Image: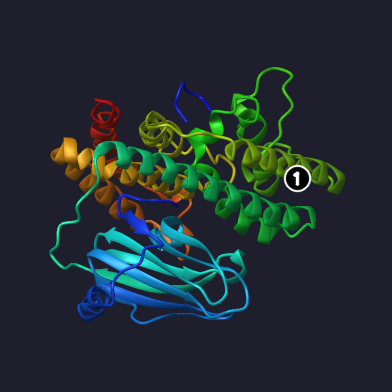
Amino acid sequence: MRRLMMPAALTLPLALLLSSCTQTGGGSRDSAKADGRTITVESSDDACTLSATSGPSGSLTFEVSNTGSDVTEFYLYADGGDRIVSEVENIGPGLERELVVAIKPGDYIAACKPGMRGDGIRVDFEVTDSGETVSAPDDTALIEQAEEGYEQYVESESAALVAATEEFVTAYTAGQDDRARTLYPQARTHWERIETVAESFADLDPLLDAREADLEPGQRWTGWHRLEKDLWPERAEDYRTLTSRQRQVLADHLLTKTDELDGRIRDLDITVDQITNGSRGLMEEVATGKITGEEEYWSRTDLWDFQANVDGAKAAFELLAPVVAGRDAELEESLDERFDALQELLDKHRVGDGFRPYDDLTQAEIKSLADAVNALSEPLSELTAVVAS
């Protein structure tokens, strides 16, 4: 929910697309295969078979052949499959395509999508450190890649938000409260990762994300936090549980407006300043809402939101990291280190697939998190100036 004037995967800085759908001579291809830099991929109707599940950093080539009966696609994902590194699309049956990337060390996911539907058939892929420096294109190309990549990231999270919201409201309207409580923070994660973009639609934001404390006199309360209170009414005085009819009306409204948000997001043209300001704005959301425990007042699931804001801020930063590294290597290194330090603190509060309730945190733990947020926010505030210079 917007409370301050704040700004709002994809071709990532982790891997820069050099070329695709190219042809190479047999000799160079054999040499590349010998040193592990060419991976063959066979996409069938029910399998995604790679000749190797690891490769060295630097230039990597994926030779994708479609042995299935339907059109397929091949994707390389980063960050647990949340963001697209690069992709090759529309590979017809019996055809071959080639994807060449310059890639840094790390854990990735390769995926074939027969029929171009769903999440695809996924395979873990590790890029080991070869010691080779990954060269970057000029700034203009990098910025264009970042803008395209952020659009894809936001669209991906928005689509996931719609699906997760539908699952949540189905449980909620069926009276499956325990399941709805489990699904609530999971669905909210997708909203929080793109919160600054979602907030840019000033007519939709208060309908979807208004807290009770933010309501204007006479304003009808709808959205996530209205349903949150109904599921966790323990802190409310003399609360009356919503009727089945009231639940249905609110749930339908939430899903309808989330669908509308998704449609608008797909019409957005992201600019580089929206990426930099979005990264900073998400950390401001942490500082003003999540670290104080105000956002999820009823459910106390603030650390879920905290993590999601950090996810979104880091995604935006990583898209621009090659630009920043070329202009201010010290800033790029500082941001990378401080994101890692904050993540290390957050990880201490994990419980299973989620986080401890906010009320379980001690004041000392809250202060440690706040200090780490402030330490990150300071250099992050320099991002726009460096990229725009």
The residue sitting at 38% across, 29% down in the picture is 273
Residue 209 pos. (x, y %): 61, 35
> Which residue ends up furthest to the front in the rendered image?
25
Can residue 297 be seen here? The reply is yes
Q: Position of residue 202 (x, y in %)?
A: 60, 25
User: Which residue is located at x 25 percent, y 72 percent?
Assistant: 37
Question: In terms of depth relative to the viewer, which is nearer, 238 or 19?
Answer: 19
In the rendered image, residue 94, in percent from the top left (x then y), is placed at: 54, 77
Front in this rendered view, residue 375 or 282: 282
What residue appears at the point 15 percent right and 57 percent down from the top-left corner?
Answer: 133
Would you say residue 241 is visible in this rendering? no
Q: Position of residue 226 (x, y in %)?
A: 68, 38
Number of callouts in the render? 1
For the residue carrying disc 1, how many other residues have a C-alpha within 10 Å: few (<14), some (14-19), or many (20+)? Answer: many
Q: Which quarter of the picture shows residue 275? A: top left
- For label 1, the SS is helix
> In this view of the protein, which residue sits in the foreground, 82 or 354?
82
To which residue does mark 1 refer? Answer: 251
Q: Quadrant of the C terminus?
A: top left
Answer with the quarter of the image where residue 247 lies: top right
Which residue appears farthest toward the top when viewing the image?
217
Q: Mark 1: which amino acid?
A: Ala
The quadrant in which the N terminus is found is top right
Compared to 118, does 273 lie above or below?
A: above
In the image, residue 226 above or below residue 300 = above
